[in-house]
Amino acid sequence: MIQSESNTTRLYSIRKPIRKKVTRLRVNAGGFYTVNGNNFLDFLEDSKVESIKGFLRGFTKANEGKTILLTIDNFSTHKSKEVRELAAELGIYFVYLPKYSPDLNPIEYTWKSTKREVSVMDADNEGEMKYRMKISWEEIAKNKGFAKGWIEKFMAGDFYSQIIATI
């Protein structure tokens, strides 16, 4: 969930007042951060099975012909039978993270950076916030350093060395 304002931003002023927008906007987004394919961002209506299935179809289409290995958390919708069946049908292989370990997922670093940028933007409505978030996320996701660091830390062998060489 991306919000229009950060909970941790502090503002200080000695001479003139600071006006801070108090409108809070929230957007439900899903992202596919890839090493050697097309990054993909989509806005979901909710986190229910049908929305997740639509997201899987979207990033599979954006990465047609590629083998997809998706690092994913243990959210109940992600592990549902329907989602797993669709993933198998689309040729997506899931790697489930251990519980309570988002730091093991490289996309979490792109979300953290995106949230930081979006939280200080002054969006007036949900559409504008989505636009700004998309631009920010796409620029941040170009940085393959998040994935490279993750691969170097958690994986080994010739296959992974070849992947790192393409980054």
Image (cartoon, grey):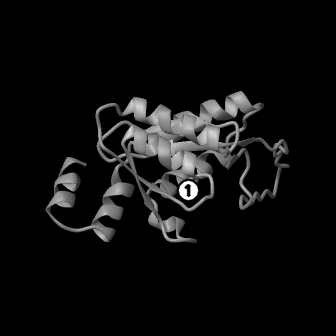
159 left or right of 125 in image:
left
Q: Quadrant of residue 92?
A: top left
What residue appears at the point 51 percent right and 41 percent down from the top-left corner?
Answer: 137
Q: Is residue 148 above or below residue 127?
A: below
Q: Is residue 162 visible?
A: yes
The amino acid type of the residue labelled 1 equals Lys
Label 1, on which residue? Answer: 79
Q: Residues within 10 Å of mark 1 (few under 14, many from 20)?
A: some
Residue 99 percent coordinates (x, y): 55, 71
**Camera-nearest residue between 29 and 75:** 75
Query: In the image, what residue occupies the spot 21% across and 59% down?
Result: 160
Residue 34: image x %, image y %? 37, 46
In the picture provided, is 152 more to the left or to the right than 82? left
In the image: residue 59, left or right of residue 164: right
Residue at image position (48%, 41%) is 86
Q: Position of residue 167 (x, y in %)?
A: 25, 49
Residue 13 versus residue 22: which sits nearer the camera? Answer: 22
Question: How far across and down, in percent of the image, does residue 139 sit?
Answer: 45, 39
Looking at the picture, tell me which residue is in the foreground, 23 or 64. Answer: 64
Q: Nearer the viewer, residue 9 or 148?
A: 148
Quadrant of residue 28 in the image?
top right
Please tell me whether residue 27 is drawn above or below residue 79 in the rendered image.
above
At x 22%, y 68%, the residue is 156
Badge 1 marks a residue whose secondary structure is: loop
Whether residue 32 can be seen here = no
Q: Count the numbered circles shown.
A: 1
